[in-house]
Amino acid sequence: MSKGPYESLNLGRKSGDDVERVDENRRRACAAVGADLEQLALNYQVHSARVLRAEPGSRGEHADGLWTDEPGVPILAMSADCLPIALVRMNGGVPAVAVLHVGWKGLLAGIVASGVDALGPSQLAAAIGPAIGPCCYEVGEEVAQPYRERFGDDVVRGRNLDLWTSAERALHAAGVESVHRFDRCTACEPETFFSHRRDRGTTGRQGVIAYVTG
């Protein structure tokens, strides 16, 4: 429904877009995956390591992750260069899912470990969605150095940071064995993805929705 720099399926109400259009976009996104918009839970994202148990229909908590084992409660994490990560409990126990909004600050702060801990000691699988890639993501030394120390020298190439690999290593370190990466750069694909850096802040938000089926 959205137009201009927010065209077309912008999910972010705080992006500057018309909120009625955003609400319709959210309804369409939920309908496409069989989720109930009235039950949709999402955070006020602040680049933290905080992961909350989702309450049906909840809005506005300052956090960057949600998890649920309650059937039919969809959870949404939004991004426009940051990593959207989905986690799924796979060990045959009570089904559970989590979604994380992971920027460079949150990754260093431990958002990935928080998401894994929220789902408890179990076999997990993860998917790392589209985000700004090492082809486009230039950072200063104040960001590059802690990433080298935490995730290895090779995640920084010149001035460019590889968030994809850093997140994959964080997931493995937290005990996630199965990690699927999409490796699609949001900044490189303007026809498909919103990008905060490419569009200089005037852009929409894509997202990842997950829920436990009944």
Image: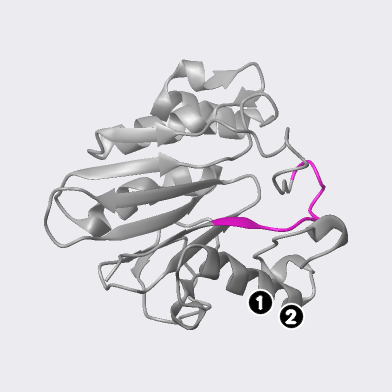
Q: Where is residue 154 in the image (x, y as percent from the top left)?
A: 49, 16
Kind of residue sitting beneath label 1: Asp
Q: Where is residue 128 in the image (x, y as percent from the top left)?
A: 45, 40
Q: In which quarter of the image is residue 100?
A: bottom left
Residue 55's spot in the image, x, y percent? 37, 79
Q: Is residue 67 visible?
A: yes
Task: Pick whichever, 210 or 31, lies toward us.
Answer: 31
The stretch in magenta equals 197-207
Quadrant in which the N terminus appears: bottom right
Q: Mark 2 points at which residue?
A: 20
For label 2, count other residues whose C-alpha is less than 10 Å away and answer few (under 14), some (14-19) or many (20+).
Answer: few
Of residues 55 and 143, the one drawn nearer to the viewer in this rendering: 55
- Type of the residue with mark 2: Glu
Q: Is mark 1 on a helix, strand or loop?
A: helix
- Disc 1 and disc 2: Cα gap in Å? 5 Å
Discs 1, 2 touching: Cβ within 8 Å:
yes
Please tell me the numbered disc located at residue 177.
none
Q: Position of residue 5 (x, y in %)?
A: 84, 56
Location of mark 1 (residue): 23
Q: Is residue 146 visible?
A: no
